[in-house]
Amino acid sequence: MQNTKKGTHPIQVKTFENPQEGAAYLAKRIADLINEKRDEGEKCVLGMATGSTPEPLYKELIRLHKEQGLSFVNVITYNLDEYFPITSDSNQSYHYYMHRQLFDHVDIKRENVHVPNGDLPKEEVEAYCRSYEEQIEKAGGIDLQILGIGHNGHIGFNEPGSDENTRTRLIDLDERTREANARNFGDINEVPTQAITMGIHTILKAKEIYLMAWGDAKAPAVKNSVKGKATKDVPASLLQFHQNCTFVLDKGAAKELN
Ligand code: PGA
């Protein structure tokens, strides 16, 4: 059923046979945008996500760079989130993830890469989060935002309860999120209890948004986001407030939509 709440728009859904095909579709959209911007002499500002979901996308972007000459010299990136506290060189940090999964393999300029700094004294975090938002604004805003989705419907680390007015800030992680991410830390007790994340408001300001989800386990969160009402209890459902948001799904993640 179409959502009729004022200000909401239906989320577009594209379903693919498998994650590789979904990732190839999104990589092509990103490559086209980068090239369009380059032809206009402009920078392309991308909002980046971490986790297992974007891995096939980053693999495909690297392939396009190596085999088809896709260049990232005009690309500026802002990542969604980072654990707090964590040092950038820690193997579990999202700084480390982004370099290993993408940045080390393409020709992006290091000064154009931005991942929230999880290694700050706590009293500096608030001002830092404000400056992260200002930097994005100064760069002209995010042209295309990439997202994954948590089992609880989170986007970035905007856990349930995060509403559409939230900005970049420090947040307490849900137990379910810490459990899901414990695989990277070996032990749940090693997973930080907090993170710095862009807010829902920050995400909604992007000109174009693509959320990827793979596998049956994400199907309920996907269904609640697309078919349910826009509510802070399911943060991804707040993407209904955006006019140009597409979910890129494999068959498993899409299975509860029909
Ligand atoms: P995942 O995490 O890609 O590792 O499943 C997604 C998310 O929590 O946003």
Image: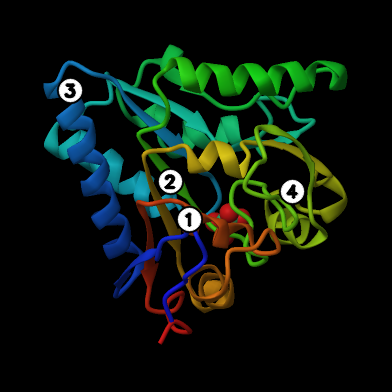
Task: Determine whether 114 is above or below 151 in the image.
Answer: above
Q: Mark 1 points at which residue?
A: 7
- Does the numbered disc 3 mark a residue whose Cβ is under 8 Å from ligand 1? no
Q: Quadrant of residue 183?
A: bottom right
Q: What residue type is labelled 4?
A: Phe
Real-space CA distance between mark 2 and mark 3, rounded to the nearest whole angstrom? 20 Å
Q: Is residue 30 left or right of residue 154?
A: left
Q: Nearer the viewer, residue 187 or 156?
A: 156
Mark 4 element type: loop
Determine whether label 4 and label 3 are within 8 Å by CB: no
The disc, 2 or 1, on the residue closer to the chain's N-terminal end is 1
Mark with earlier residue (4, 1) = 1
Q: How far apart are marks 3 and 1 (CA)?
A: 33 Å
The residue drawn where x is 60% and y is 21% is 132
- Tag 2 secondary structure: strand
Quadrant where ligand 1 appears: bottom right
**In the rendered structure, which disc, 4 or 3, sits on the residue that comes first in sequence?**
3
Mark drawn on residue 146: 2
Amino acid residing under circle 3:
Arg
Q: What's the CA distance linking mark 4 and mark 1?
A: 40 Å
First in sequence, mark 2 or 3: give its number: 3
| View extreme (front): residue | 6
Mark 4 lies on residue: 185
Q: Which of marks 3 and 1 is nearer the N terminus?
A: 1
Rendered-image quadrant of the N terminus: bottom left
Label 3 sits on residue: 38
